[in-house]
Image: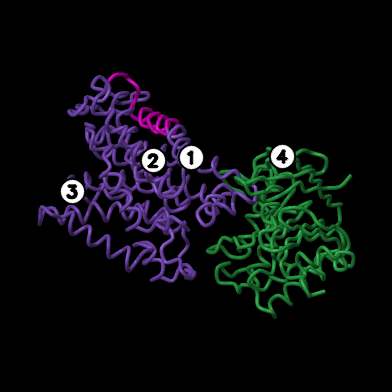
Amino acid sequence: MNGWLGLAVTAFALALAPAGLPPYAMTLLTEALILGLFAMSLDLMVGYTRLLSFGHAAAYGLGAYTAGNLLLHTSIPMVFAVLLAGLFSGIVAIGVAWVCTLASGVSFSMLTLAIAQLFYAVAFKWTPVTGASDGLAGIPRSPGPFGITFFTDKIGFYYLVLGCLCGAFIFCRSLVRSPFGAVLQGIRENEAKTRSLGFDTRHYKIAVVAISFALGGLAGALYAPFAGFTNTELLFWLFSGQVLIMVIVGGAGTLIGPIIGAAFFMLVSNLLSSWTDSWALFFGLIFICFVLFAPQGIWGLATRWFGRRRAPEVKGKRWRSLNWTG
Amino acid sequence: MALLELDGLTRRFGGIVAVDDVTMHVEAGEVRAVIGPNGAGKSTLFHLITGVVKPSSGSVRFAGEMLTGMPPQSICQRGISRTFQLTALFPEMTARENVRLAAQARHGRRWQPYGGGAVFGAAERMGDAALERLGLTHVAQRPAGLLSHGDQRLLEVAMALAQGPRLLLLDEPTQGLSVEETEQAVATLAGLLADGTMTVLLVEHDMEVVFRLARMITVLHRGAVIADGSPEMVRADAEVQRAYLGGLA
């Protein structure tokens, strides 16, 4: 099956979803798409560049708080506010990436974690901007521009999220297939060699972190008016870990996989939590099984099943995304 | 004016002088080998030329331009390509993608974050030609990690070649190869260098290989140059025999 055709069919089905699904399911689906966008943004770093971030919640939280403040304190229409918040997140990420890329491997991961925790601590103390432990509440879905109110109701907001996800997906897909993307994959497989070929790999890494944060920030920015509130949990390391799990379970380095991983995570955690309080334990077991037996993730398994792609098994490289030392 | 000029190049690591006042010229079109026993400073010399290691004193000039102090990427962009003693490839990419990425590094729009038909097209032409010259066309679609060790070594040379370098640095191209593989690799490399258009600086352990490929030889011993000249001269040099060749010549 042609890739674009499958994509068009999926997008079409998602566009028709409001006609057939009850309201509570639409709420879940909207959240799943927001998380899917978030996971896909992390895939640019983890799956394509092997920059393992333990602090991607920083992007989400940054976007959510920025959008929350814009919507609470200005009259900027929501559509523009979320885009501005994503952009802001990406700009902040240039500084974050500049610091983190001073190191590589495990040290890089630890720096991402440290910076995310720094943001978390700031969110706890900076009451006028972040509302401290109360968070920001009553975030409106400001209408406009030109008096357009379509995006403010439940279904309209769903279409806004779907539009952002589709746009981001097409953007990412084009990015990873471009010359820039080829360099990222070079960094993933052998950064020293990529550098010796004459690429300034640090610039590429900073750029991909900025893009990843901008899209992750966009996801967070969508979450703020979706939920109507933000709190410091959006910046907590637990959330960074969860999104990493979504990427790996879904299939790192595939863009589609992490979106599926996010939906899978939401679905399974919802089912498990209605059944037991210790759902995280069981999800942990599922995660371990994936790492051990299906490191290519759900999407990797699916494509192998349908034989759509050759998947050459390179010796000693069972796991390519979590392998720090290469 | 020589293409590459090393002048009084010295590098100390603590109390050890790894490279000691090396002055060496490589003319355009020359194939020069640097030989010497283990620890003679051959690898450090390569690192100094490519900017990976900064010299304690002395200078490196390339086509009249001072390279000393430049970061490795800038030096590389001046037209110096190298291979590594331990094979360095992109194992999950195909051989063709490996050379394509190498050639892409020389393209003005190598960073273009969208589309890329033109960039990839140009890089593929350079890359495919390099694969052809090293006889690797038949394995172009195989992942580099699955190639035989001999083909991997040649693929690394192809990657350097795909960059259209003005100076090619080869670090022990036959390292770790079996006798047959070495024979094959040397034949391929000799064919490549036969027309005398390439400027090559070669580090090699295997004297057999050196005498077949190089037309000029520099002998290093404890970081210093002890002989410099044609293979015949070097072979006859008494000091070289003491330091390195032993009873071989």
Mark 3 lies on residue: A22
Earlier residue among tags 2 and 1: 1
Judging by colour alone, the chain drawn in green in this rendered image is: B
- Do the dots labelled 1 and 4 sit on one chain? no
Q: Residue at x 28, y 42 (%)?
A: A237
Instruction: Identify the mark at residue B57; answer none if there is no mark.
Output: 4
Dot 4: element: strand
Please tell me whether mark 1 or mark 4 is closer to you in this view.
Answer: 4
A269 or B167, nearer to the observer:
B167
Residue count near mark 4 (Cα–Cα under 10 Å), binned few <14, some 14–19, many ≥20: some
Q: Position of residue A18 (x, y in %)?
A: 26, 47
Task: Report the magenta residues as a range.
Answer: A73-92
Judging by colour alone, the chain drawn in purple in this rendered image is: A
Q: CA distance from mark 2 to mark 1?
A: 9 Å
Mark 1 lies on residue: A102
Q: CA distance from mark 4 to mark 3?
A: 75 Å
Mark 2 lies on residue: A111
Mark 2 vs 1: CB contact within 8 A: yes
Q: CA distance from mark 2 to mark 3?
A: 43 Å
Dot 3: element: loop
Dot 1: element: loop
Q: Residue at x 76, y 57 (%)?
A: B220
A283 or A194, nearer to the observer:
A194
User: What's the amino acid at mark 2?
Assistant: Leu
User: What's the amino acid at mark 1?
Assistant: Leu
Asked if the stretch drawn in magenta spans residue B183, the answer is no
Left or right: where A302 falls relative to A211:
left
Residue count near mark 2 (Cα–Cα under 10 Å), binned few <14, some 14–19, many ≥20: many
Q: Residue at x 25, y 36 (%)?
A: A226
Circle 2 chain: A
